[in-house]
């Protein structure tokens, strides 16, 4: 299913063609073709943005602190 944000972004990307249609410089078929081309491009760009920002705002739960006991080698010792 296509997200509304994708359609809005595609509409924004094809806005110059829509404006040229309003000023009667291009045909409606040209505008629709440009919009249909903009939809998958917008979907890929927004998916990339969601992937990059997926970890933002998450807080990690603090782990249990490890207390070393005497006689056991610590991490990194041979």
Image (cartoon, grey):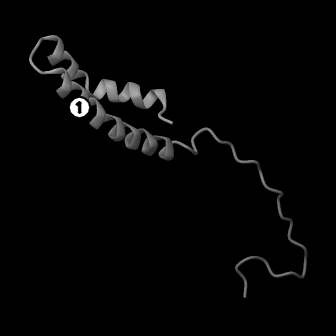
Quadrant (top left, top right, bottom left, bottom right) of the C terminus: bottom right
Q: Nearer the viewer, residue 36 or 46?
A: 36
**Residue 72, image quadrant:** bottom right
Which residue is disc 1 drawn over?
34
Is the residue marked by circle 1 packed among few (<14), some (14-19), or many (20+) residues within 10 Å? some
Q: Nearer the viewer, residue 62 or 33?
A: 33
Where does the image place residue 47, in percent across and percent down from the top left?
45, 43
* Side of 15 where 23 appears, left or right: left
**Residue 15, image quadrant:** top left
Where does the image place residue 22, in percent across and percent down from the top left?
18, 11
**Residue 28, image quadrant:** top left
Q: Which residue reaches farthest left?
A: 25
Look at 9% across and 17% down and name the residue there: 25
Q: Which residue reaches farthest right?
A: 70
Element carrying mark 1 = helix
How many numbered marks does the figure carry?
Answer: 1
Where does the image place residue 23, in percent across and percent down from the top left?
12, 11
Q: Which residue reaches farthest front?
A: 29
Image position of 1 with respect to 66: above or below: above
* Side of 52 where 14 appears, left or right: left
Image position of 28 with respect to 38: above or below: above
Where does the image place residue 37, in percent across and percent down from the top left?
27, 37
Image position of 65 with respect to 26: above or below: below
Look at 39% across and 24% down and name the residue there: 8
Look at 79% across and 55% down and name the residue there: 63
């Amino acid at each position: 299913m296509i997200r509304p944000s994708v359609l809005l972004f595609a509409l924004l990307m094809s806005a110059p063609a829509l404006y040229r249609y309003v000023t009667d410089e291009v045909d409606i078929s040209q505008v629709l073709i440009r919009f249909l081309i903009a939809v998958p491009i917008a979907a890929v760009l927004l998916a990339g943005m969601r992937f990059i920002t997926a970890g933002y705002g998450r807080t990690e739960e603090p782990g249990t602190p490890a207390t070393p006991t005497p006689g056991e080698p610590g991490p990194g010792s041979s």
